[in-house]
Image (cartoon, coloured by chain):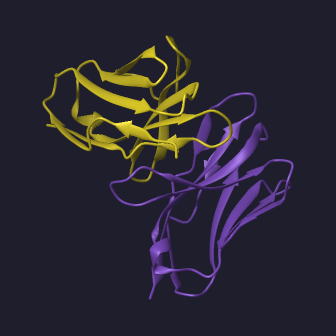
Amino acid sequence: DQQVKQNSPSLSVQEGRISILNCDYTNSMFDYFLWYKKYPAEGPTFLISISSIKDKNEDGRFTVFLNKSAKHLSLHIVPSQPGDSAVYFCAAKISGTYKYIFGTGTRLKVLA
Amino acid sequence: DVKVTQSSRYLVKRTGEKVFLECVQDMDHENMFWYRQDPGLGLRLIYFSYDVKMKEKGDIPEGYSVSREKKERFSLILESASTNQTSMYLCASNMNTEAFFGQGTRLTVV
């Protein structure tokens, strides 16, 4: 049973436009949600996180939105750049632990 | 900057071999993790450790063991490598919210 789901395996966006990556979760016992970016043959790099008590967190071109009633979070990248092309994983941290549940990833391709 | 270093980028091993994957972090983090990444499956937790000599099984521990004799070092051991353990292995460490990952080890078992 996949507790954290990324239903879109891939996404293509034109350079300069907005990229929206989505993630759904089924468990209410998560206290933090995180987004990681991964290039081929490298480890994931932390991008941005949000506490479960917030609904928005912004860092430069990256904004994460959390909709607790829908159990949905999204990552917005504005404006998208070719260097943003990578696989993006959402992750959820289980409350009271240091365990993370990862989604299956979305491959973003930003077209120049 | 947090540095998590995995000893090998690429490894090729034979079926039945005992394989050691080493990971070192330099930030004095309490918690360390081993994940494997497979296409379509995301990152799956194999084992994690929250202190020296302390470990807990993750979601897919079968066929693996771990060792944490020093705080900065966390080793993953494949007792008898099998072809279904061909994967990208990722080590991570954390203290608070976000985990920091090493560069990964691409292991191929032939």
Q: Quadrant of the C terminus of chain A?
A: bottom left
Say which chain is yellow: B
- x 27%, y 18%: residue: B79
- Where residue B7 sits in the image (x, y, percent)? 29, 35
Between B91 and B12, the one lying in front of the other is B91
Q: Is residue A33 found left or right of B103 in the rendered image?
A: right
Q: Is residue A24 found left or right of A38 in the rendered image?
A: right
- Where residue A4 sits in the image (x, y, percent)? 63, 48
Q: Quadrant of the N terminus of chain A?
A: top right
- x 65%, y 64%: residue: A22
- Where residue B70 sits in the image (x, y, percent)? 44, 16
- x 55%, y 66%: residue: A8
Residue B72 vs A26, above or below: the answer is above
Residue A2 vs A106, above or below: the answer is above
Between B67 and A31, the one lying in front of the other is B67
- x 45%, y 85%: residue: A111
The shade of chain A is purple
